[in-house]
Image (cartoon, rainbow, N blue to C red):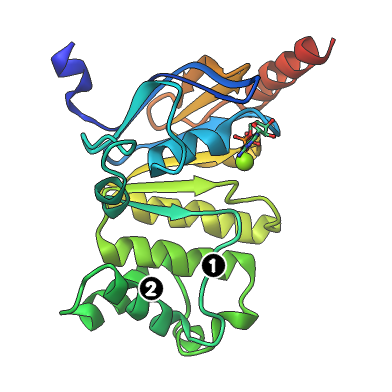
Amino acid sequence: MKSETADAVLEARHLRHSYGARRVLDDLSLRVGAGEIYALLGGNGAGKSTTLNIFLGFVRPGSGSASVCGIDPSTAPDEARAALAYVPESVALYDHLSAYENIDYFLHLAGANRHRTSVIDPALDDVGLVASARGQRVGGFSKGMRQKVAIALALARNVPVLLLDEPTSGLDPRATAEFNDLLEAARKRGIATLMATHDLLSAAAVADRIGFLREGHLDEEVAANGGARFDVDALFRRYSERRESRTA
Ligand SMILES: Nc1ncnc2c1ncn2[C@@H]1O[C@H](COP(=O)(O)OP(=O)(O)O)[C@@H](O)[C@H]1O
Ligand SMILES: [Mg+2]
């Protein structure tokens, strides 16, 4: 048992959670290792954001536990948050500041008072934010560009965990492809990435494993086969069969 849990950077064990009488998570367990991209796939209301909020320490599970680098966010939320970067569906930035200034400011808030300048440009290079955009106010940035800034901040903070909520909703195909490349930058740095999404295509394009969240637990987990990507047609059939059987 011990060796099995040793290399999980993110782990959920038998999570159960209800809002009032509504049971949302019902025995959800998952693990994400270093350098791994895990897509938690499910429809609206499946419990994806609730799961992320448990890792963030914003929601305390009714039972079961979560851990972020061995830290339990329900008892040590600040420590857990210090180990992770969270990219919500709409990234909150200071609109009157530039990309560079936003990262510099958030790094300062995170307690990094030295060497900030030496980590910001390499991080912006890694996410592919063009040099001409770095000094511009982010107020006019698209969702895709704001995500680049948020992920560059994660890289600059050198956190081991990245949580993303519906990162591709509202992105056009080109921005989606760029987003997929962004996750590769995180993977190269050995970051454990958990992405909550209803976008099967994006999950299939980037994830190492996909967990199908249904009725509060993972009713199936599929892994990309070595270097081969997922068979999207087969995944789509399985995903839609599930949805049909649920609505039948
Ligand atoms: N703070 C809350 N209070 C009450 N119900 C909530 C709350 N947050 C989420 N829910 C409900 O829990 C279910 C799961 O929500 P959520 O985790 O946001 O799902 P997803 O992110 O997969 O769409 C939904 O039915 C939602 O309405
Ligand atoms: Mg959600």
Q: Residue at point 23% right, 38% down?
A: 69
Q: Residue 195 versus residue 126: which sits nearer the camera?
A: 195
Q: Quadrant of the N terminus?
A: top left
Residue at screen point 63% across, 16% down: 215
Q: Secondary structure at mark 1?
A: loop
Circle 2 sits in a helix, a strand or a loop, which is it?
helix
Vertical order, 168 against 52 (above or below)? below
User: What type is the residue that disc 1 sits on?
Assistant: Ala
Foreground mark, 1 or 2? 1
State if disc 2 and disc 1 touch (CB < 8 Å). no
Q: Residue at x 47, y 79 (%)?
A: 130
Residue sitting at x 45%, y 57%: 182
Q: What is the residue that sits farthest to the front in this orientation? A: 20
Q: Looking at the picture, how far across and down is residue 112, in whole percent?
A: 21, 72
Image check: 178 left or right of 66? right
Q: Which mark is residue 92?
A: 1
Residue under label 2: 124
